[in-house]
Each structure stands twice: as structure tokens, then as C-alpha cells.
Amino acid sequence: MKHIATTLLTIAALAVACTAFAGPPIPGDYQTTDLGGVISMGRYTEGWQAGGAALLPGTTLLAESWNGVSLGTEWNYRCATTAAPAVMLTNTVNASGFGNRTYMKQFIGGTIWLSGAGPWANGDTDYPGILDSYTEFETVQYENFLPVAAVTNVQATAHFANYPAACMTFAVSNGVEIGNTPSGMTKPADYPDFLAADCSPTAPHGAWWNMLTMTLSVSAGCATSAHPSTWGAIKTLYR
């Protein structure tokens, strides 16, 4: 009788395990609604401590889907932090202080999350994962040497925690800064929190963005480029 009970418990445990992890997210390219896709565009913040700044180490990100009512119901990525100052790739600011500068910011650490109800759904409640790389190219417009506007694009890769062989890349082709605390503005409540480097929502300063034209690609196998970009190749893109 004891043997039968143990067997039944084992079968039940296996059934629960199978239910918990039904399968990796379905491979495909998923785009935001402004590109004709079905996933929501996003809202994004970068937070930093007193004495910090958007282009300095210690800037921590948080991006969440925005469906017009709620944040983070479809996807998010969070808690990646810059460990080094941004690298200036181009500079067209003239002697009068007018022009643009493009910076490359590299973030380390961080996580991703996809809802189990998204178009990639394959039976799991959700799909948590780990960011493997996150690079942001931020172009800042200056007038009289003061920053007046900024746009960004993002290239990132990640893998799923429960399915290490399943990977994701995502690209944001058009992020637009809406406001920042150094200019005296207050972040609206319907933008993500400012995160500190420990991922707590306690950073006192930051900037907030709208993230548009996003493509999220899920693949069944993880692969890395055999020909990684050189510094020269990256700079050429922004000349």
C-alpha cells in the first residue's frame, strides 16, 4: 500500500512539472502595433542616484509594455545597469553649441519577462529570462550646448530561464525621450519607476521615454554571430 501511495505521488509530481513547463515560447518575429504587429509599444525609464546622469555609470533601466491603460501586462525588461560612462560615437555640435551627439551605452545584468498570454504563448503561465546583452545608441540634440531632445535605438539579446536553448533578440528602432528630472520635470505616474542599481524603485532622478517600432524575435536555438561588430563598424553606422 505504501509503495502504491509513493508511486501515485511521483506520478502527480511529474504531472505538475509537465503542466508548469508546457513548452518554450513559439518562435517568430513579433512587432509592435505601430509596425502592423500585435504587441503593445512600451514605456521606459532610466534611473540614477544624486550625482549621476543618463550617460554615467550606475544608470538602471526599466521598460514595460503599455496598452494605453496598464504597464507591463505583456512584456518587460528591467534591472540592467551601466558600469561605464557612455562612449561618444559622433559629434556634430558646432562652436555655437548647436548639433547632435550620438552615444553608445552598454548595460549589464537584468531580466526579461513575457506574458504567457502573448502571441508567443505555448502553454506556460509566463516566460522569464536573462538579458545577455543590451546596447543603446542615444542621439542627443543640443542648442546653446544644452540638451533639448533625445532619441534612441536598442539592440539586445536574452535567453529564457526555463528553456536555455530558446533565445530572444529585440530591437527598438525609435525611442523618444519625453522628460527628465534634471530639467525640473516630474515623471508621470503612468511611466515605470526609476530603479536604483539594486533594482529597487528608489532612484531619485531619471528620464522617461516612449519606446516605439519594436521587434521581438524568439528563436528555438541560441546562436551568436561568427563576425562580431568592430568599433569601426559601429561608428560607421552613425556617421
Image: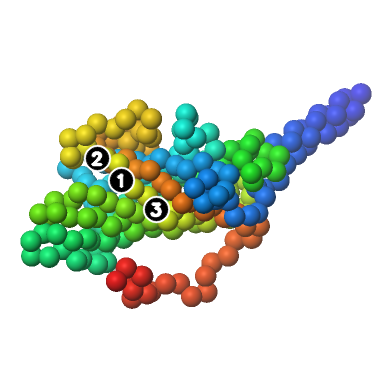
**In this image, 114 relative to 193: left or right?**
right
Above or below: residue 7 compared with residue 75? above
Amino acid at dot 3:
Asn
Residue most extreme to the left: 96
Res. 23 visible in picture: yes
Image quadrant in which the N terminus is located: top right
Res. 57 visible in picture: no
* Cα–Cα span, label 1 and label 3: 10 Å
Q: Which residue is mark 1?
A: 177
* Cα–Cα span, label 1 and label 2: 8 Å
Name the spot of residue 90 as percent of width and height, x first.
24, 67
Q: Residue at x 17, y 42 (%)?
A: 51
Looking at the rendered structure, the secondary structure element under dot 3 is strand
Amino acid at dot 2:
Asn
Q: Residue at x 66, y 57 (%)?
A: 220
Amino acid at dot 1:
Glu
Dot 3 surroundings within 10 Å: few (below 14), some, or many (20 or more)?
some
Q: Residue at x 47, y 43 (%)?
A: 41
Q: Residue at x 46, y 32 (%)?
A: 68
Q: Which mark is residue 174?
A: 3
**In this image, 162 relative to 105: left or right?**
right
Looking at the rendered structure, the secondary structure element under dot 2 is strand
Name the spot of residue 152 as percent of width and height, x first.
34, 54
Looking at the rendered structure, the secondary structure element under dot 1 is strand
- Callout 1–callout 2 Cβ contact below 8 Å: yes
Name the spot of residue 192 as percent of width and height, x first.
38, 35
Above or below: residue 145 compared with residue 77? below
Q: Which residue is mark 2?
A: 180
Residue most extreme to the top: 1
Q: Nearer the viewer, mark 2 or mark 3?
A: 3
